[in-house]
Amino acid sequence: MHELGIVFHILRTVNEVAEQNSLTEISSVTLELGEVSGVVPELLTDCWKWAVQKEDGAAHGASLQIEPIEAVTVCNDCQKTYATVQYGRLCPFCGSENTVLQKGNEVAVKEITAQ
């Protein structure tokens, strides 16, 4: 379960931001989570709830909000974009496999809210 490792990394980042900004209590963290990031939102949330109760920094007890990011792929041959999950690597417009994931793989802290 790599979700726990991701949670620890996010907590380190949040605590660094809190320290840099003299924040003593973080109430919530908003995370952007790509549709094809390989992270299971439910597991991430469960790990978060466990970790913030053990946390002794500013993020102790903070809630986690997850904003899903749709996976979008661009075709290098016809230059059109399409929903990655629905069509995979094969462009539904021209049939090319010369495609690149444009977005949807991210795991990023979007917002930290302090009390």
Image (cartoon, helix red, strand yellow):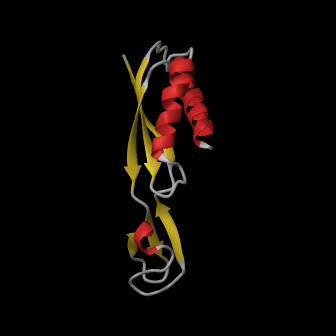
Q: Position of residue 90 (x, y in %)?
A: 49, 80
Quadrant housing residue 67: top left
Q: What residue is drawn where x is 46% and y is 45%?
A: 41
Q: What residue is drawn where x is 50% and y is 48%?
A: 40
Q: Position of residue 52 (x, y in %)?
A: 51, 23
Q: What residue is drawn where x is 42% and y is 87%?
A: 94
Q: Is residue 37 above or below residue 10?
A: below
Q: Position of residue 53 (x, y in %)?
A: 51, 19
Quadrant housing residue 66: top left
Q: Is residue 65 above or below residue 78?
A: above
Q: Position of residue 56 (x, y in %)?
A: 57, 14
* Horizontal side, residue 111 vs residue 3: left or right: left
Quadrant housing residue 81: bottom left
- Is residue 65 among what the camera can see? yes
Could you tell me which quadrant the C terminus lies in?
Answer: top left
- Counting every numbered tag in the picture gives 0
Q: What residue is drawn where x is 55% and y is 54%?
A: 38
Q: Nearer the viewer, residue 20 or 82?
A: 82
- Is residue 17 among what the camera can see? no
Could you tell me which quadrant the N terminus lies in?
Answer: top right
